[in-house]
Amino acid sequence: MKKFRLHFVAFVIISLFISCNQQEAVSEESDTKDRNMFGLYIPRGLTKTSDGLSPGYVMFVPSNSSSTYLLNRQGQVVHQWKSNYGMHTPYLNEDGSLSALVVDPDFPVFAGGGEAGRLQKISWDSKILWDFEYANEEHLAHHDIAVMPNGNVLAIAWEARTAEEVLQAGRKADMIPKAGLWPSHIVEVAAQGKNGGEIVWEWHIWDHLIQDNDPTKDNYGIVSEHPELLDINKGRRLPPPITQDSMDILQANGDAWRNQTAFNRGSDVFHLNAINYNSELDQIVFSSPTLSEIFIIDHSTTTEEAAAHEGGKRGKGGDFLYRWGNPENYQQGDSTHRKLFGQHDIRWVETGKPGAGNLTVYNNDIPMGPDSLDYSAVYEIEPPINQTGNYELLSNNQYGPEKQTWNYVAEDTLSFYGSFISGAHRMKNGNTFINEGPRGRFFEVTSEGEIVWEYLNPYRGNIHKPNGDVIPPIPFAYSQFRSTFIPEDHPALKNKKLVPLDPQPEEFKLPPKPKKEKT
């Protein structure tokens, strides 16, 4: 029974990631004029290939699964890693092991998209080498991790703050749920033994707030003069109140998170969803889709300096070195200056790849495209970093750039659109590998925007509800939070026998479409 419950939590990460998309109607017909964001009832597997592709593999976690697959360019699974918990965000290490964020089966308090709670290291042959729990009543690891060169792991996590603490920090009373808020923090964990971990560095959003609402409360100041701080009155607004009876009905129908209550809806105020580390700069970048901004902070600080406004190589302590995407959040400009809309998967382009030092991001839900529909894009931007490692403001007191260095947008907004999850990263050949998350579509595009390889995930795990019932697959049957291109020369693959598994994992087939009633 515990295993069933654990597996159900894994499913929830994807299937309830954003409630706003649950109201989107799912087409019963595969009409080319229908966006069909989830890709239901369309052909799956390898759909496009080309000559001269960079040799390599694709790593991904099928939805509703505790396994990670490695796929060759012919669309065949050649390896899999297995966890004892639902898998969420894996990264491949040079020794062939995975460092992964996985789902703790019984964490308390917290509820929301990307909930997880455990950090694992899993060997090539699926032995659990390290299993560290970061889940209790005070904090919960969620969404994403970054593996550092020394083997330590940076993890995003929520922390619980009471309604009284939040009010004293300067948030408006009508924006505070009874359960308080869960602002995120970042911890650096050094593995100790098989289950231990030492927090060797940490940074908290809570230490870098400002507000201009109430001079009698903490953090009072002029928001427009402090882009290095976060206005505590930004972030998610409270949803309409509901009774506990209504929440009980949502829980019974599987339409709410396990720990969600009538009083903690809206507690996940800033909702961080991605983290990446740059060892050359010793800086961290993270993403908040709720704020529609990405942020860079200094990792060269001590933990004490990270809680302050001075210190570290850049001299700014734990304050933001850089932010981009929505300058209205720091009262510079207006909605017309906004660049990001619910973005995911912020990453630096790595050394040795075209555009090295730039940032790539999947911009999920840009309003009013060429055919008046919201659309997605992948952006590459060049942050305005100077020789000291700090970032310069433009003359209008906003952080640049004003325009992207490169972007990918489909010719229409029907063929490429994922309003949530999703991601992208640069390849060695200069192409960009994209994960259109809701549809479970992986594809490679050239710098000119030509698609040279495309694959649609046909797999889904067989996780069940705690009572043994099958979890309904529609609409998130094939959705993917992340997928990663692994080049053939990656050290992890040296001397590995990578031949197609025989038999291949069983593909998931949706039940027949309901027939339309004739009128």
Image (cartoon, helix red, strand yellow):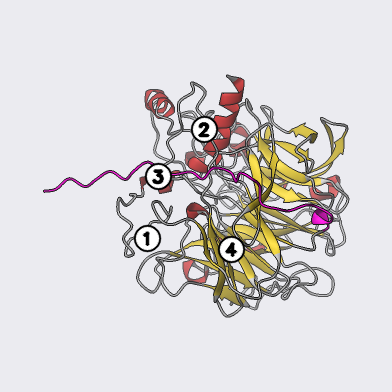
Q: Residue at x 44, y 75 (%)?
A: 411
CB of mark 1 within 8 Å of CB of mark 4?
Answer: no
Q: Which residue is mark 4?
A: 434
CB of mark 3 within 8 Å of CB of mark 4?
Answer: no
Is label 1 or label 3 in front?
Answer: 1
Which x, y percent locates residue 89? 66, 46
Report the amino acid beneath label 2: Asn
Q: Which residue is mark 1?
A: 35
Q: Residue at x 80, y 63 (%)?
A: 489
Of helix, strand and loop, which one carries label 3? helix
Q: Does label 1 or label 3 sit earlier along the sequence?
A: 3
Q: Say which of 18 and 314 sits in front.
A: 18
State the mark number for residue 22: 3
Question: What's the CA distance linking mark 2 and mark 4?
Answer: 34 Å
Is label 3 or label 2 in front?
Answer: 3
Q: Does label 3 or label 2 sit earlier along the sequence?
A: 3
Q: Does label 3 or label 4 sit earlier along the sequence?
A: 3
Report the amino acid beneath label 1: Arg
CB of mark 1 within 8 Å of CB of mark 3?
Answer: no
Q: Say which of 496 and 20 sits in front.
A: 496
Of helix, strand and loop, which one carries label 1? loop
Label 3 environment density (alpha carbons within 10 Å; few <14, some 14–19, many ≥20): some
State whether the magenta stretch is mostly helix, strand or loop: loop
Report the amino acid beneath label 3: Gln
Of helix, strand and loop, which one carries label 2? loop
509 left or right, relative to 516: right
Q: Residue at x 64, y 40 (%)?
A: 67
Report the amino acid beneath label 4: Ile
Is residue 511 on the magenta stretch? yes
Is label 2 or label 4 in front?
Answer: 4
Question: Magenta segment, which residues?
Answer: 491-519
Of helix, strand and loop, which one carries label 4? strand
